[in-house]
Amino acid sequence: MYVIRLPDGTLRVPHGVLSESGHDAAEGRIIAQAYVEIGPDDPDYDRLLAGSLTEAELEEKRRRWRDEDGDLQRAFEEWKASRAED
């Protein structure tokens, strides 16, 4: 997950939560990933701002991953086939 910089300067920061859902072990744990929004008054704002992406930059990164995934998949299949021949 990435820190997302919104047009108004607010940052959406990934936040994870791990909690027990109940006393019975069968109920297990709840693991959640979400975003919290922080503004310039937050003590971590400047540090997080440096590595943040706009929503457009994040979408471009995702598009590149999808486009390049085909090449990676083909290379893996070729490698796997070469290992099967040995």
Image (cartoon, helix red, strand yellow):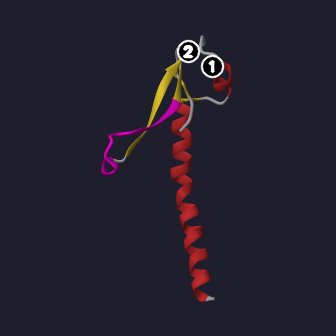
The kind of secondary structure element at disc 2 is: loop
Specify the label residue 6 is tagged with.
Answer: none
Sequence-wise, which precedes: disc 2 or disc 1? 2
Instruction: Name the residue located 61 percent from the left edge and 75 percent from the top edge.
Output: 79
From the viewer's side, name the closer residue of 25 and 58. Answer: 25
Q: Residue at x 34, y 49 (%)?
A: 25
Do tag 2 and tag 1 residues touch (Cβ < 8 Å)?
yes
| Extent of the magenta region | 14-27
Q: Residue at x 61, y 29 (%)?
A: 52
Counting from the top left corner in percent of width and height, residue 84 is at 57, 85
Q: Position of residue 48 (x, y in %)?
A: 64, 26
Residue nearest the observer in this picture, 16 or 61: 16
| Picture layout, residue 15 above or below residue 68 | above
The image shows residue 1, relative to residue 74, as above or below, that is: above
How many numbered discs?
Answer: 2
Please say if 86 is above or below 21.
below
Residue 26, magenta (yes or no): yes
Instruction: Look at mark 1 in the image and give the residue it sits on.
Output: 45
On the image, the x and y values in percent for residue 13 come to: 53, 28
Compared across the picture, whether 56 is left or right of 27 comes to: right
The answer for how far apart the CA atoms under marks 2 and 1 are is: 7 Å
Residue designated by label 2: 39
Give residue 4's quadrant in the image: top right
Amino acid type at mark 2: Gly
Q: Secondary structure at mark 1?
A: helix
The image quarter in which residue 11 lies: top right
